[in-house]
Structure formats: C-alpha cells, structure tokens
Image (spheres, rainbow, N blue to C red):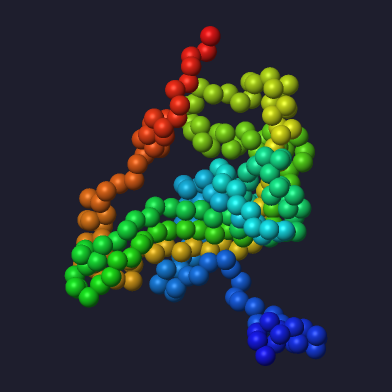
C-alpha cells in the first residue's frame, strides 16, 4: 500500500492525521541557524521591507511588494501593504486564508578557499525571515489612505519634499479604487540566518574579511541603466 492509500485509509477510519503533518512553519531551519530574537527579526523586517507575499489558495501566487510593520498591534506585530485589485491574490484577503510573507536580506557565495581547513566545500550564506498569518482587507477609505500615507512616509524618509496629504482627493481616490490594502497579524515569525556562525573564530574572521572584498552585486542604478540600453529608442514627445 502506498502512502496516499494509507493516509486515505486512516482518514476513512476516522483517525487523527495531525500526527502525520509536518511541524508548523514554512521554513527548514537547522538549529545553528535559528534566530528567535523578536526585536532582531522585527528590525530585519523593517530594513528589508520589500517582500514576497506567498499564498496557496486556490493555487500558488507570489506578489512582490513594499510593506511596513506595525509593532504595537500584536505580539509579533502586523504587516501592512497593498496589491492591485486586479491581482487574483487579492481574493484571499478574507482573514481566514493563510499566507507567508518572505523578507530577504543579504546573501553571498562562500568560497571554500576562505576556510582554514582544505576539506571544505562551497556554500551560500543568507538571512531570511518568514512571517505567517491570515491577511484581511482594509476596506475603509480613511484607513486605506492612512495605510498608504504610512507606507509612503517609510520609504520617502525624513526630510522628503513629497507631501502625499496635499494631493487632490479626486486623484488619490481614483488610484485607491484600483488597489486593495491588507493587514496581516503575524501568527508565526521564523528567522533563518545562515552566516557561518557555527564555524570557529578563525573561519568567521576570514568570512568577514573575504566578503568585504568579494565582488558586489550591481546596484539598482547600474541594473536600470543596463536594462535601458536593451530597450528600443523611444522618440521624444512632440
């Protein structure tokens, strides 16, 4: 009897299958890489706030969005953002369907030549945080406007000359009609920092030294400029 038939037989017998299910969580984390410091994980979410919103009903959907974290509304906080109303993923914002929001930090190839022992293999170091919850829609126009104002303020930063509050209401309301805001109270917060912390002090020092000298990724400015070079020449507006 294969596993599928076995599970079906157990279900038919009315047995509890919960013991068959994997442990809660969306992320495999070896013990040395577990990070549970709540403030550190929240600081990580704040710093690397452009995230992947992942849902699985009725099918897998992933949307890449800027977010902001309200730390005061729940033990782990509440994540807020918005997506296009035309995005099929917006239909799961009912407060019941689970979602995972993935926050990605720096990452890099790690050469075995950096280690003190010759018997080493390459690896990839990275840091990620997964926040699990059940997104619900922000339907009140005033609440959605405030969500957008907070989101803009986060990314504009202090001293910005942009004033969202001074835009004409007709203009803002027209744009707001095309989006759906959401808030997701975090029910589970998982941190995986694979940074070589399980290695000896000499290897750690070598990692930091060599990472500082490693080839860096293209900046957004460099990537954008290179991409523009591939586009057809656009005629100037007449």
Res. 162 visible in picture: yes
Question: Residue 122: x percent and y percent?
Answer: 29, 66
Query: Residue 145 lies in what quarter of the image?
Result: top right
Q: Is residue 25 above or below residue 169?
A: below
Query: What residue appears at the point 51 percent right and 32 percent down from the top-left corner?
Result: 156
Question: Residue 210: x percent and y percent?
Answer: 23, 56
Q: Is residue 7 left or right of residue 122?
A: right
Q: Is residue 4 left or right of residue 212?
A: right
- In the picture, which quadrant includes the N terminus? bottom right
Question: Residue 53: x percent and y percent?
Answer: 60, 52
Query: What residue appears at the point 25 percent right and 51 percent down from the top-left corner?
Result: 214
Query: What residue appears at the point 80 percent right and 85 percent down from the top-left corner?
Result: 12
Res. 76 visible in picture: no
Q: Is residue 193 above or below residue 11?
A: above
Q: Nearer the viewer, residue 5 or 50?
A: 5
Q: Is residue 110 above or below residue 92?
A: below
Query: What residue appears at the point 68 percent right and 58 percent down from the top-left corner?
Result: 59
Query: Residue 165 lies in what quarter of the image?
Result: top right
Which residue ends up furthest to the top in the rendered image?
Answer: 238
Query: Residue 140 lies in what quarter of the image?
Result: top right
Which residue ends up furthest to the front in the rendered image?
Answer: 232
């Amino acid at each position: 009897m294969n596993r599928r038939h076995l599970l079906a037989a157990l279900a038919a017998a009315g047995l509890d299958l919960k013991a068959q299910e994997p442990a809660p969580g969306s992320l495999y984390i070896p013990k040395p890489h577990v990070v549970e410091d709540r403030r550190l994980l929240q600081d990580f979410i704040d710093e690397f706030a452009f995230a992947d919103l992942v849902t699985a009903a009725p099918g897998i959907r992933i949307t890449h969005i800027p977010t902001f974290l309200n730390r005061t509304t729940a033990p782990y906080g509440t994540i807020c953002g918005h997506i296009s109303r035309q995005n099929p993923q917006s239909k799961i914002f009912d407060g019941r369907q689970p979602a995972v929001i993935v926050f990605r930090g720096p990452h890099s190839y790690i050469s075995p030549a950096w280690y003190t022992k010759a018997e080493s293999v390459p690896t990839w170091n990275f840091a990620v945080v997964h926040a699990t919850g059940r997104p619900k829609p922000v339907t009140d126009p005033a609440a959605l406007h405030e969500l957008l104002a907070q989101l803009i303020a986060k990314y504009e930063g202090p001293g910005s000359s942009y004033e969202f509050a001074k835009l004409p209401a007709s203009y803002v309301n027209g744009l707001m009609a095309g989006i759906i805001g959401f808030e997701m109270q975090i029910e589970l917060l998982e941190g995986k920092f694979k940074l070589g912390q399980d290695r000896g002090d000499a290897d750690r020092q070598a990692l930091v030294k060599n990472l500082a000298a490693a080839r860096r990724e293209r900046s957004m400015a460099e990537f954008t400029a290179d991409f523009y070079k591939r586009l057809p020449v656009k005629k100037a507006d007449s």
